[in-house]
Image (cartoon, grey):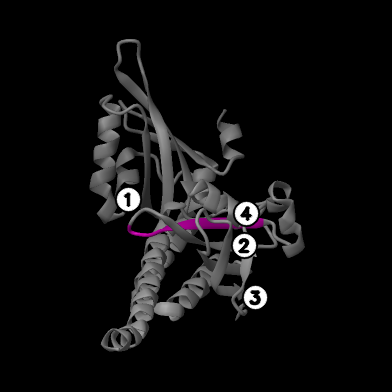
């Protein structure tokens, strides 16, 4: 069983809860750059935990060992052989005697450092977007997402009708250049699925197999996120697409909702301003008519 685990992407380790000795797999040592045999005790493993994560992780482990949780699962930072901390995702369970007494813990760790790094970059980008507004915001949003995700086609749109059947782009970035904005029908498209379902649509590969119309755009991967106004009405979406599969270390989809909330607020603000401007432009004419 240990050999099967070593062939996977996960680093395996098991801890004897009586002796507090730990046996790590070759994959686990390689994942963090350590030589086999460098680590063999629970105390040594605990010393590698990031100071900001250590207390919470040890409490969560203790709760699981005591039987307060059905399994252990967490993301945390651990010090690698080069001295840098890397994010890992850890999951596992405790084995118990028939009496319920725990005697061994089995864990699987996966290196998620690249994905967490992207998430942190995305959050920083979202914070930076607070400094821009209007059409500049939507262009900056597309530039940020394209730069971080490496996607070829990136667009943000607003719905032209209700229920939505057609949308218009606010910004469309293709191969690093912004194109003229345009309208398009949603029927049969990946974007149409986002609007119809009202939820994030993520297809890491095989877009054309699901929506054949996408073949004309040479797309293979897609992520689309709906935009809702303050009244919970769907008003648009943004999407990032590419002609190749999306990276394996994509951030949790919840991260994209940060951008969705900000984009929806900006779109709602713009539409409100346009409506107020339209009312203001009619006021002098209406007042003149009343005086007449």
Mark 3 closeness class: few <14, some 14–19, many ≥20 residues within 10 Å: some
Q: Please name the residue that numbered disc 1 is placed on.
A: 49
Mark 2 closeness class: few <14, some 14–19, many ≥20 residues within 10 Å: many
Are the residues flagged by discs 2 and 4 in contact, CB closer than 8 Å?
A: yes
Say whether residue 130 is left or right of residue 176: left
Q: Please name the residue that numbered disc 3 is placed on.
A: 175
Q: Which secondary structure lies at badge 4?
A: helix
Instruction: Tell me where residue 79 appears, x and y as whole percent.
Output: 38, 55
- Vertical placement of 145 versus 204: above or below? below
Instruction: Tell me where residue 61 appears, x and y as whole percent.
Output: 29, 36
Q: Which secondary structure lies at badge 1?
A: loop
Q: Nearer the viewer, residue 245 or 138?
A: 138
Mark 4 closeness class: few <14, some 14–19, many ≥20 residues within 10 Å: many
Observer-side mark, 2 or 4, equals 4
Q: What is the number of the mark on residue 254?
A: none
Q: Please name the residue that numbered disc 2 is placed on.
A: 241
- Vertical placement of 128 versus 35: above or below? below
Q: What is the number of the mark on residue 190?
A: 4
Which of the two discs, 3 and 2, labels the residue nearer the N terminus?
3
Which of the two discs, 1 and 2, labels the residue nearer the N terminus?
1
- Vertical placement of 106 versus 215: above or below? above
The alpha-carbon separation of the residues under discs 3 and 2 comes to: 11 Å
Q: Which secondary structure lies at badge 2?
A: strand
Q: Image quarter for residue 105?
A: top left
């Amino acid at each position: 069983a240990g050999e099967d685990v070593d062939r996977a992407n996960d680093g395996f380790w098991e801890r004897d809860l009586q002796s507090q000795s730990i046996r790590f797999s070759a994959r686990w040592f390689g994942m963090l750059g350590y030589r086999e045999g460098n680590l063999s005790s629970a105390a040594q493993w605990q010393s590698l935990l990031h100071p900001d994560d250590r207390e919470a992780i040890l409490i969560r482990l203790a709760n699981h060992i005591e039987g307060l949780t059905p399994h252990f699962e967490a993301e945390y930072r651990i010090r690698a052989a080069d001295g840098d901390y890397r994010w890992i995702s850890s999951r596992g369970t405790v084995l118990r005697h028939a009496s319920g007494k725990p005697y061994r813990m089995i864990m699987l760790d996966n290196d998620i450092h690249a994905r967490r790094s992207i998430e942190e970059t995305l959050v920083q980008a979202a914070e930076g977007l607070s400094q821009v507004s209007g059409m500049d915001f939507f262009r900056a949003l597309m530039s940020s997402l394209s730069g971080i995700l490496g996607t070829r086609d990136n667009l943000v749109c607003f719905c032209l009708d209700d229920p939505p059947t057609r949308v218009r782009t606010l910004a469309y970035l293709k191969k690093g250049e912004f194109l003229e904005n345009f309208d398009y029908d949603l029927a049969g498209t990946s974007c149409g699925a986002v609007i119809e379902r009202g939820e994030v649509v993520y297809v890491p590969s095989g877009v054309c197999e699901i929506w054949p119309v996408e073949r004309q755009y040479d797309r293979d991967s897609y992520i689309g996120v709906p935009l809702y106004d303050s009244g919970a009405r769907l008003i648009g979406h943004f999407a990032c697409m590419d002609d190749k599969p999306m990276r394996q270390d994509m951030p949790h989809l919840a991260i994209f909702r940060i951008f969705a909330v900000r984009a929806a607020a900006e779109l709602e603000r713009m539409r409100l301003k346009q409506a107020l401007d339209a009312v203001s432009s009619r006021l002098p004419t209406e007042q003149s008519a009343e005086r007449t």
